[in-house]
Image (tube, rainbow, N blue to C red):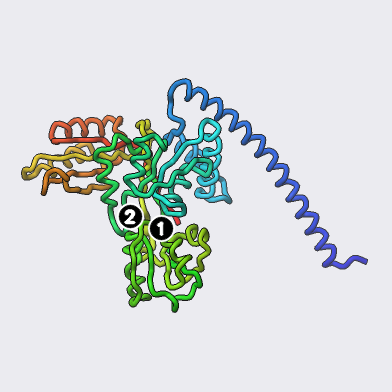
Amino acid sequence: MATASSKKSSKGVGELADLRKRIDEINLKLVALLSERARLAKAIGDLKQAGGTPVYQPAREREVIEGVVAHNPGPLSADHLRHIFAEIISACTALERTIRVAYLGPQHTYSHEAARGRFGASANFVPEPSIAAVFQALDNRRADYGVVPVENSTEGSVGLTLDMLIDTPMVIIGEILLPIRHALMSRQGDPALIRKILSHQQSLGQCREYLTANFPGCELEAVSSNSLAAKRTAEEPACAAICSAAAAEAYGLKLIAENIQDVAQNTTRFLVLGREPVPRSGADKTSLLFALPERAGALHGALSLFARERINLTMIQSRPQRERPWAYLFFVDLQGHCDDLRVSRALRSLRRRALFLKVLGSYPEAGAATA
């Protein structure tokens, strides 16, 4: 005679089998729908190629992903759907043509993580040894797009990226906000063995208070990337690296401490570079740089042009002009697209006042970064 517990167990096994059967049926439907989507994407790619249109369309990608997110009933989060559809779009784009994306390498850097998050795993990623080399890869057509860091919420702007934007013919076509969660790793995972801590200069700065409090006697060495720090740490038992979880996993390191950044919401902003400007998405940002005559009130007058048009400025940064000591260029980010009426009016007025004006690009504005 069957007991109550055995009946309950049999019922549970039967329910599990039914649920798995339904999942298998849904999986087959997903395959059919994804195949149909891929065929349509391939047809669109043929039309793009015939018309000379770029394969990668940031505004359209934003429209697709945000449209999906807007209809999300749960339980998957909005970020889950963004990651899923980024990979779907990446795979379908690869049917049109595999795009090449240069980034500040080597592999497993935060730049690599940002590039993969934006372009998906189906892109061909080209690691470059420096920010300047990323720009050169686009100039030499060794890559179709580039991803470079431009500012960190803790340490501020990346000066080399700003300097490279002055002369490049490339335009900004997108931005990426990547939460930076630093971890301290070593071969053994034992903090007592650590005599030297390696990381990129920016990462050392972002963890300054933690290192002072917990490793006051350790030597700090800045290296070209966090990934290189992880590689060296795997070879040197007395070293530790501040790096990402991906870099630590790649080199077999063990965790000493995680989330060691001094500011919890530490975020790095990356720029996506391309050759062709992108159309309006409806929620855009424009980056520009300009130089002004050296007279009292010149900067105030220039900025008032945007206030008059009710345009919000989200960043202003000055950089020395290399050919003129004590003269400065101003980098500005503003909300809106250069084709918007109010923005175009402000830019026309600024052009009349400025010694030099360059619109670096208008592109879809990134949403708030999430952990």
Q: Residue at x 69, y 42 (%)?
A: 26
Q: Which mark is residue 180?
A: 1
Q: Which mark is residue 152?
A: 2
Q: Which mark is residue 2?
A: none
Q: Residues within 10 Å of mark 2 (few under 14, many from 20)?
A: many
319 to the left or right of 217:
left
Answer with the quarter of the image where residue 215 lies. Answer: bottom left
Q: Are marks 1 and 2 in contact (CB under 8 Å)?
A: yes
List the single residue furthest toward the left.
295
What's the distance in space between the residues labelled 1 and 2, CA to CA? 9 Å
Give the answer, above or below, for where 34 lies relative to 177. Answer: above
Quadrant of the snapshot with the N terminus: bottom right
Give the answer, above or below, for where 217 lies relative to 360. Answer: below
Who is closer to the viewer here, 119 or 366? 119
Kindly identify the amino acid type of the residue bearing the numbered disc 2: Asn
Kindly identify the amino acid type of the residue bearing the numbered disc 1: Ile
- The disc, 1 or 2, on the residue closer to the chain's N-terminal end is 2
x then y, percent, for residue 48? 47, 25
109 to the left or right of 39:
left
Q: Secondary structure at mark 2?
A: strand
List the single residue furthest toward the right.
1
141 to the left or right of 302:
right
Give the answer, above or below, for where 67 lies relative to 161. Answer: above
Give the answer, above or below, for where 196 lies relative to 128. Answer: below
x then y, percent, for residue 220? 34, 69
x then y, percent, for residue 16? 75, 55
Quadrant of the snapshot with the C terminus: bottom left
Answer with the quarter of the image where residue 311 lies. Answer: top left
Who is closer to the viewer here, 66 or 45? 45
Q: Residue at x 31, y 63 (%)?
A: 205
Q: Secondary structure at mark 1?
A: loop
Q: Residue at x 34, y 77 (%)?
A: 217
